[in-house]
Image (cartoon, helix red, strand yellow):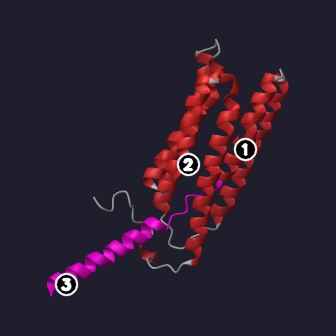
Amino acid sequence: MDREQAARDLELIGRVLEQTRRRVDPQMFHMIVWGTIVLFWYPLMTWLQATGRGRACLTVSLVAVGGGVLLSAILGWRHGRHPRLAATNTLFAQRLGQLTAIFIVTGVVLSFAVPILSPSGGGRYVPHVWGLLYALMLMTLGVIYSREFFFCGLPSLLATLAALHWVDQSGYLLGPAMGLGCIVAGTIAERRVARLRREPVEAADSADVDPLHAES
């Protein structure tokens, strides 16, 4: 009888942990925003540089970055005030956000460091840095969050390798690969959140369980 009770308890714990793993809102609408921006921004930058319009490149970059930051901030503030999932695993969601922030901050640092430390043409490879970071970010999220993200990161990796050979065409290669990869990954995550909002909450009291340490 004790064995049967123990088996039932383990089954219940397993269901609770699985429910907790699934109820995560990683707020991947940020990926959709930046994926859309990069999809158009990078090819446009390559075209402007090829036609010798340096001032237009600066203007486009300021508009793209400023608009992206503003839109992400507004959406993040809006969804932060009113959580979209009941009994959401906020700890795991925060860790996903922190992981994403590590890649983004690293990219920002390298965007300044590469041209400064390699003044003789190093700036040409800043898009490649971002392509590699986007690939690693998506592939890492594919390991710890959703396997589909891993495959969304592969095009960015392949495009980065190809852009090393065709440096002058890097924006045409990296923009679609990075942009579409982020849009597809973000759409998958957002559809998952929408589906979870329609499902009944079975583990409302287990929202703070950390799935990364639950099995340790």
Q: Type of residue at label 2?
A: Cys
The C terminus lies in quadrant? bottom left
Residue 152's disc number: 2
Return the residue nearer the eye: 146 or 66: 146
Label 2 sits on a secondary structure element that is helix
The answer to which of marks 1 and 3 sits earlier in the sequence is 3
Q: Which residue is mark 3?
A: 4
Circle 2/circle 3 CB separation < 8 Å? no
Label 3 sits on a secondary structure element that is helix
Instruction: Decide: few, some or many residues near mark 3? Use Cα within 10 Å; few <14, some 14-19, many ≥20.
Output: few
The image shows residue 34 at horizontal and vertical percentages of 68, 46
Circle 2/circle 1 CB separation < 8 Å? no
How far apart marks 1 and 3 lie (CA) works out to: 56 Å
Residue 72's disc number: none
Q: Which residues are magenta?
A: 1-30
Horizontally, is 67 left or right of 81 in the view? right
The answer to which of marks 2 and 3 sits earlier in the sequence is 3
Disc nearest the viewer among 2 and 1? 2
Q: Is residue 65 above or below residue 50?
A: below
Return the residue nearer the eye: 131 or 86: 131
Which residue corresponds to the image point at 75% horizontal and 38% vertical from the top-left? 41
Return the residue nearer the eye: 128 or 82: 128
The image shows residue 95 at horizontal and vertical percentages of 47, 53
Instruction: Decide: few, some or many residues near mark 2? Use Cα within 10 Å; few <14, some 14-19, many ≥20.
Output: many
Q: Which residue is mark 1?
A: 37
